[in-house]
């Protein structure tokens, strides 16, 4: 008996190790594939980066000198390897437009974009889970219908347009918040968070509407399972069944959407940061495109792609925590 239990424990450990190894290998290969595509599109396929950066009026001598400065006189594979090596060491090159290390620019802008994404994700999760669970518990009743109407309106609402409405109402009319800009964290935590409230709400509205519908559908699906009827037959109340048995099993599809949404919140800051004139990563890449600063564009796009890949990897690992059956099946 003891030998059987010990063997079962070893088999479980092996399954967990294989699951994590497969996910880690997929994570690394996906990062490499994304970096290759980004490098090819922004450095090889469009043509000569020096021509793009200097413009059509540049002399051939100036273009050639700039090629040497950027290392464009080297073969593409050598440049690609040098770029990956620079990323590994935190050396992303020097911005043409700002004459500043790209890594420094990105870190400074992340101090705005990352808190904005975290705040928007927190609002999304709080609103969506509350409304989704409530709608499922009130299935086919007035509360359920109200949540569905709200979510449909939220899905149809463009975040940038909703952001403009928030500016008109809370900044221009009520004067509760500023219309845009960011004072900097040196001015105080409250001032910084206050500047991010409206853009976070604008981003969270659409994402919360989507997640609320997913949560409702997932909870309703689990409520129809046999083990839920068994729990009710044992005398458990609807609230006890919901919190003890339903939510854990319904959380897997919800977790998937939450991971994708957090990645999209960071990647989608390009629009909302320009609406609120926030000095974040989204506005940086927008300005870099306007300035033809391809070094900044390439590294910021790689950062956004890596964020999506990392979040998906974390979600895969959390799957195994929420539902061990997925871990054993994958292994």
Image (cartoon, helix red, strand yellow):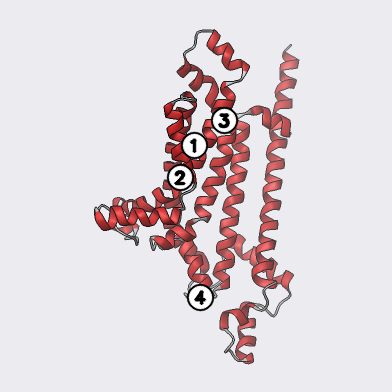
Answer few, some or many: residues within 10 Å of disc 3's Cα (few below 14, many 20 plus, some between 14 and 19): many
Q: CA distance from mark 4 to mark 1?
A: 40 Å
Q: Secondary structure at mark 4?
A: loop
Q: Which residue is mark 3?
A: 218
Q: Which residue is mark 1?
A: 212
Badge nearest the viewer, 4 or 1: 1
Height in image: 315 above or below 14? below
Are the residues at dot 2 and dot 1 in contact (C-beta closer than 8 Å)? yes
Q: Which residue is mark 2?
A: 154
Q: CA distance from mark 2 to mark 1?
A: 10 Å
Residue 286 in the image: state x and y as whole percent.
50, 67
Mark 4 or mark 2: name the one nearer the start of the chain: 2
- The residue sitting at 59% across, 66% down in the picture is 298
Q: Secondary structure at mark 2?
A: helix
Q: CA distance from mark 1 to mark 3?
A: 10 Å
- Residue 189 appears left or right of 8: left
Answer few, some or many: residues within 10 Å of disc 4's Cα (few below 14, many 20 plus, some between 14 and 19): some
Are the residues at dot 2 and dot 3 in contact (C-beta closer than 8 Å)? no
**Residue toward you, 154 or 312:** 154
Answer few, some or many: residues within 10 Å of disc 1's Cα (few below 14, many 20 plus, some between 14 and 19): many
Badge nearest the viewer, 2 or 1: 2
Q: Quadrant of the C terminus?
A: top right
Residue 45 in the image: state x and y as whole percent.
70, 72
Q: Which residue is mark 4?
A: 291
Give the image quarter of residue 6: top right
Badge nearest the viewer, 3 or 4: 3
Mark 2 or mark 1: name the one nearer the start of the chain: 2
- Residue 321 appears left or right of 147: right
Mark 1 or mark 3: name the one nearer the start of the chain: 1
């Amino acid at each position: 008996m003891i030998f059987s239990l010990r063997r079962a424990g070893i088999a479980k450990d092996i399954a967990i190790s294989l699951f994590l190894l497969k996910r880690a290998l997929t994570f690394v290969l996906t990062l490499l594939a994304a970096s290759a595509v980004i490098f090819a599109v922004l450095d090889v396929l469009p043509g000569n980066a020096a021509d793009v950066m200097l413009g059509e009026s540049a002399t051939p001598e100036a273009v050639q000198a700039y090629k040497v400065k950027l290392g464009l006189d080297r073969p593409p594979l050598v440049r690609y390897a040098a770029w990956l090596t620079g990323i590994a060491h935190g050396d992303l090159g020097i911005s043409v437009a700002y004459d500043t290390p790209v890594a420094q620019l990105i870190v400074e802008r992340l101090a705005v974009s990352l808190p904005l994404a975290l705040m928007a994700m927190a609002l999304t999760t709080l609103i969506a889970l509350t409304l989704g669970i409530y709608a499922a518990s009130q299935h086919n009743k007035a509360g359920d219908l109200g949540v569905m109407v709200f979510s449909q309106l939220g899905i149809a609402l463009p975040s940038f347009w909703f952001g403009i409405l928030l500016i008109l109402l809370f900044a221009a009319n009520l004067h509760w918040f500023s219309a845009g800009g960011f004072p900097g964290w040196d001015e105080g935590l409250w001032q910084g968070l206050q500047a991010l409230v409206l853009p976070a709400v604008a981003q969270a509205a659409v994402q919360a509407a989507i997640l609320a519908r997913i949560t409702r559908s997932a909870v309703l699906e689990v409520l129809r399972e046999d083990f839920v009827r068994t729990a009710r037959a044992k005398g458990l109340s609807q609230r006890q069944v919901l919190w003890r048995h339903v939510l854990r099993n319904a959380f897997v599809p919800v977790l998937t959407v939450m991971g994708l949404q957090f990645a999209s919140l960071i990647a989608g800051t390009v629009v909302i940061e320009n609406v609120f004139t926030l000095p974040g990563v989204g506005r940086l890449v927008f300005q870099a495109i306007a300035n033809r600063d391809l070094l900044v564009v390439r590294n910021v796009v790689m950062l956004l792609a890596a964020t999506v890949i990392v979040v998906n990897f974390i979600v895969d690992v959390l799957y195994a925590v929420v539902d061990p059956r997925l871990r054993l099946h994958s292994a």
